[in-house]
């Protein structure tokens, strides 16, 4: 290893987020309840600053630093942007909710920012150790956030489940990574990939290690059969945390898959392709079928996540550039849909009342036609009905699958999305065809209303003109 | 200058913009919403007229073309254009929407703005379906159409509306998702999403068969063909009058249009090989569903089943050309059949729309669709009775009405394929007359059945205007169908000469 000094310019956004998170932690100690808004302000400044720094400092091409363990490339730099946006919007949606319940503490933002930092590290990892480091930073923040409402039995239980299962998955992943290290003698992803390319077909141990790595990745996606934690954690966590869990980490999981499966073990695509196929079909089946039986919207959306991850994996397993960009497009669109869906749940909730049951959506069209329409857009987008963004996400993935001569997979996928359409329709039915049980007016801040509306309209806008985002997703992988 | 105006885009986006405006005007000012809606529906109708006036009947080429890049990553274009097959259907759409909006003026009191907006947006989307020349653009419009209809049935429908609308949505979604896979496959093979490129693409028999089946599911559900028709009676019975009219007059045509635009030209050999199946299913629809219609106790259900039977004529007409060509070695009979099918589509649009509107007139007064609740309506509503009897006659194919022209052309053509087809089709004329006229006898004629019928008021000016316009249309098309047949002729001829050449 050479001792040249690392190029710090490439990690300025990461250092900025780290510094600001620490700063908020300290500043918040000196703030009393009324001034807590300042922490919120600083957190948003951090997010916006990181966004600007990433855009501003973005180097052309790929650059390695820290002895080849950190990479700055178009993929990483592009994926960080939605992560910032999603985190910022999560902070915005959460604020009113946490305030009403006396949960607004500076730690929420600190943990959120550390989680974001973890995701940034995953996205830019170029060594097996870096990716594990990012993963743990991000997971530890999330465990704590899930348990944020420490008086809630449900939340503590969810956090415990999440912690135990996630620790197990991390252990399995780490075991796989250590096998890779043992086989190749290096932690550098490119070197592992080189080794795999040259020892293709003769080293069963590589496939053995791959299986462990894949389990770790599948767990982070929440793909069946590693999905057990998703419904319980989504349900148990405070809704803003569910919102956080449901959006940005999907992009991080995609990045993890790209780094570990494509960058590191790309030569083994013939092995991981079929494995992902099993995961994808199982996820589509489990997610879509079980979601029908749910009466709690958070649980329903949790199962819907599983099915969406199945779709995303379909894009990945194609193993083509078009497939990766389709999966990336899917991840971004899914994060936006999930953000809007949980945003509406938060919008309908108020102090002492969680709008978690499907029945709480009854007659929303009478109470608020506008937000009912937003939810309608989200639901049809999740079901993949044009002219919403969800359709193009599915179209891109299906096209990628058909391109590798696996038309049957596309048929299976559309059949399961047909089943999925039923429970999305049910939400629309409750909102539009039933009369409201709860007639409380919706109390939410103007900022939340505006951002939520923008979020919903974005799904329609991307449905009418998806080519810009699609073009970015393709460019990021070039 | 005239041809540089994007007429098709105007026809698509004017009603959609109008719908959004109506939606924004809100439910608090229903009269405003109604006025804006009628205005936009009328303007859209006027905007579709240039398509007819400027139409060149001497060519089978797509006309009024618009071609802009939309999603370059997948070679998807915002590509529009019409030929003689789609243009009449666009006019039908914009005409029927005007009527539907006028009809909804009084009968809808709940959430008026949303109702009007749904119809306007749906109008734009349906015009989009008929004019899209890019498969994905077509699919986007095709699926988007479901959302307003889903809401229309679900919000303003009858007591079992939720069941009916979810059944409607899932049924049609089932058919269309497989079509999506077929379209993606065709893109994979041809590298483009242009429907015209698909039509010239060489495909093996196996590919053709699978693609044909995928298309068949999508279009058969929409038409609907027996045995995937069961959503239709439910949807019709529960839908509000306007919804039923659009469903019967236009949505069903989209399935039939799909056969002409996709199934036949893209997979001609599979169509040829499976023509027997299509003809068999159509004949079942014509013969069996007519009998089913006979025993209905609900007027809307009866008309719904009658629609399925009449659409059976259309699907038969589209798949019989292979047999006609085989036996006569000439395209003339085949052209006659397909043109008959198109005339039947337009005519059925007018007649079924008129019949549903007539039922709507009665339903608004009595809040019942059961035939048994009526009797002797003619004594209290003579003007209505005259019009209703006229539409009933048209429905059973009386010469001089549009119902006769299409059915006659189809039967005439089918004789050239096989006399038995003609015989079976002709039974529908008998049963059609039987169920329609029997309903008319029980509802309209006879002595006044009860005091509620006794209290009926005759048509008001608005209702008379709507039914009168339809009566004129039915009569005009029945007496002089040439303007319609002329515009379709070149396109049909071109289509048939294309499909008679094997792609293998």
Image: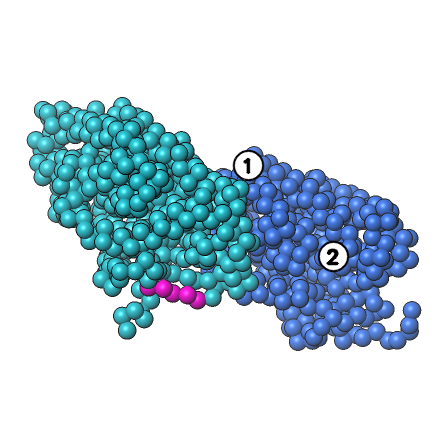
Chain colours: A blue, B cyan
Q: Quadrant of the N terminus of chain B?
A: bottom left
Q: Is residue B334 above or below residue A264?
A: above
- Which of A412/B104 is in front? A412
> Is A184 on the left or on the right of B8, as rendered?
right
Circles 2 and 1 on the same subunit: yes
The numbered disc on residue B176 is none
At 28% from the left and 43% from the top, the residue drawn is: B333
- Which residue is labeled 2 in the image? A262
Find residue A388 and report its horizontal and vertical position in percent. Answer: 48, 54
Q: Is residue B106 visible?
A: yes
The magenta region covers B64-68
Q: Image quarter for residue B26?
A: bottom left
Q: Which of pointers 2 and 1 indicates the residue nearer the eye?
A: 2
Near-viewer residue (B410 or A231): B410
Instruction: Please provide percent x and percent y for residue B500.
Output: 39, 47
Q: Secondary structure at mark 1?
A: helix
- Does B22 sit left or right of A279 as displayed? left
| Residue at mark 2 to residue at mark 1: CA–CA distance | 34 Å
- Magenta-span inclusion, residue A20: no
Q: Is residue B115 above or below residue A264?
A: above
Which chain letter goes with mark 1? A
State whether residue A148 appears in this view: no
Q: Position of residue B201 (x, y in %)?
A: 48, 53
Residue to which mark 1 is pinned: A292
Residue at 44% of width from left, 49% of height from top?
Answer: B266
Protein chain holding label 2? A
Q: Position of residue B363 (x, y in %)?
A: 22, 35
């Amino acid at each position: 290893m050479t001792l040249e000094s690392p190029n710090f310019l490439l990690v300025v956004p990461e250092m900025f987020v780290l510094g600001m998170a620490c700063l908020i932690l300290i500043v918040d100690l000196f703030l009393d309840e009324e001034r807590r808004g300042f922490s919120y302000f600083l957190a948003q400044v951090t997010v916006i600053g990181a966004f600007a720094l990433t855009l501003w400092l973005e180097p052309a091409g790929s650059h390695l630093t820290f002895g080849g363990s950190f990479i700055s490339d178009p993929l990483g730099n592009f994926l960080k942007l939605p992560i910032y946006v999603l985190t910022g919007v999560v902070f915005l949606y959460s604020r009113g909710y946490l305030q009403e319940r006396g949960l607004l503490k500076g730690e929420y933002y600190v943990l959120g920012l550390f989680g974001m930092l973890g995701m940034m590290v995953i996205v830019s990892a170029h060594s097996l150790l870096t990716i594990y480091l990012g993963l743990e930073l991000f997971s530890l923040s999330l465990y704590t956030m899930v348990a944020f409402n420490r008086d809630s039995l449900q939340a503590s239980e969810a956090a415990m489940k999440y912690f135990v299962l996630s620790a197990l998955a991390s252990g399995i992943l780490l075991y796989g990574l250590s096998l890779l290290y043992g086989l190749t003698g290096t932690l550098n992803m490119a070197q592992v990939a080189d080794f795999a390319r040259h020892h293709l077909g003769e080293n069963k141990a590589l496939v053995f290690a791959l299986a462990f790595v894949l389990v770790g990745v599948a767990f982070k996606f929440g793909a069946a059969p590693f999905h057990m934690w998703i419904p319980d954690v989504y349900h148990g966590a405070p809704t803003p945390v569910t919102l956080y869990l449901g959006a940005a980490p999907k992009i991080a999981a995609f990045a993890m898959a790209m780094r570990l499966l494509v960058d590191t073990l790309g030569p083994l695509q013939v092995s991981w392709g079929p494995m992902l196929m099993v995961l994808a079909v199982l996820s589509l089946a489990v997610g879509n079928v079980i979601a029908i039986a749910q009466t709690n919207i958070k649980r329903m959306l949790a199962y819907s996540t599983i099915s969406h991850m199945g779709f995303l994996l379909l894009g990945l397993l194609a193993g083509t550039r078009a497939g990766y960009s389709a999966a990336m497009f899917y991840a971004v669109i899914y994060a936006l849909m999930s953000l809007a869906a949980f945003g509406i749940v938060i919008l309908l909730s108020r102090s002492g009342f969680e709008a978690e049951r499907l029945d709480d959506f009854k007659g929303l069209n009478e109470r608020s036609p506008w937000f009912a329409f937003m939810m309608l857009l989200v639901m049809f987008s999740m079901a993949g009905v044009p002219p919403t963004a969800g359709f193009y996400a599915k179209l891109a993935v299906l096209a990628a699958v058909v391109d590798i001569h696996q038309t049957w997979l596309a048929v299976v996928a559309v059949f399961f999305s047909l089943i999925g359409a039923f429970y999305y329709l049910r939400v629309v039915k409750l909102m539009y065809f039933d009369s409201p049980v709860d007639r409380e007016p919706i109390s939410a801040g103007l900022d939340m209303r505006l951002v939520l509306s923008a979020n919903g309209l974005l799904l329609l806008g991307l449905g009418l003109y998806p080519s810009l985002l699609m073009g970015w997703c393709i460019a990021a992988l070039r | 200058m005239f041809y540089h105006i994007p007429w098709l885009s105007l026809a698509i986006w004017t009603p959609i913009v109008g719908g959004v405006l109506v939606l924004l005007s809100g439910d608090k000012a229903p009269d405003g919403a109604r006025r804006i809606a009628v205005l936009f529906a009328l303007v859209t109708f006027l905007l579709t007229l240039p398509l007819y006036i400027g139409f060149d009947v001497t060519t089978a080429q797509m006309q009024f073309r618009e071609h802009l890049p939309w999603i370059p990553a997948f070679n998807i274009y915002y590509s529009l254009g019409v030929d003689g097959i789609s243009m009449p259907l666009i006019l039908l759409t914009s005409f029927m929407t005007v009527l539907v909006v006028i009809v909804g003026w009084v009968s809808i009191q709940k959430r008026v703005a949303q109702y009007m907006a749904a119809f306007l947006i749906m109008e734009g989307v349906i015009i989009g379906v008929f004019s899209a020349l890019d498969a994905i653009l077509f699919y986007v419009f095709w699926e988007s159409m479901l959302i307003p209809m889903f809401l229309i049935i679900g919000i303003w429908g009858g007591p079992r509306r939720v069941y009916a609308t979810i059944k409607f949505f899932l049924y049609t979604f089932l058919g269309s998702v497989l079509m999506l896979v077929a379209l993606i496959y065709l893109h994979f093979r041809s590298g483009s999403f242009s429907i015209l490129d698909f039509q010239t693409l060489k495909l093996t028999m196996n590919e053709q068969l699978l693609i044909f089946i995928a298309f068949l599911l999508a279009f058969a559900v929409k038409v609907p063909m027996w045995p995937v028709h069961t959503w239709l009676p439910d949807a019709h019975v529960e839908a509000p009058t306007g919804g039923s009219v659009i469903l019967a007059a236009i949505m069903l045509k989209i399935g039939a249009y799909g056969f002409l635009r996709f199934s036949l030209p893209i997979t001609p050999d599979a169509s040829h090989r499976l023509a027997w199946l299509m003809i068999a299913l159509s004949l079942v629809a014509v013969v069996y569903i007519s009998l089913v219609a006979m025993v209905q106790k609900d007027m809307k259900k009866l008309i719904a089943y009658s629609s399925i039977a009449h659409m059976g004529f259309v699907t038969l007409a589209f798949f019989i050309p292979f047999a006609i060509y085989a036996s006569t070695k000439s395209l003339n009979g085949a052209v006659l059949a397909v043109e008959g099918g198109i005339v039947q589509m337009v005519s059925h649009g007018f007649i079924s729309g008129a019949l549903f509107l007539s039922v709507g007139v009665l339903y608004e007064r009595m809040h019942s669709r059961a035939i048994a609740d009526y009797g002797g309506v003619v004594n209290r509503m003579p003007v209505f009775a005259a019009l209703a009897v006229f539409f009933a006659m048209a429905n059973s194919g009386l010469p001089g009405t549009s119902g006769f022209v299409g059915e006659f052309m189809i039967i005439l053509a089918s004789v050239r394929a096989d006399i038995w087809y003609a015989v079976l089709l002709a039974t529908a004329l008998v049963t059609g007359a039987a169920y329609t006229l029997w309903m008319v006898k029980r509802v309209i004629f006879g002595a006044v059945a009860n005091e509620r019928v006794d209290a009926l008021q005759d048509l008001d000016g608005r209702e008379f205007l709507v039914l009168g316009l339809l009566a004129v249309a039915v009569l005009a098309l029945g007496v002089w169908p040439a303007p319609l047949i002329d515009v379709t002729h070149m396109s049909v001829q071109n289509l048939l000469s294309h499909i008679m050449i094997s792609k293998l």
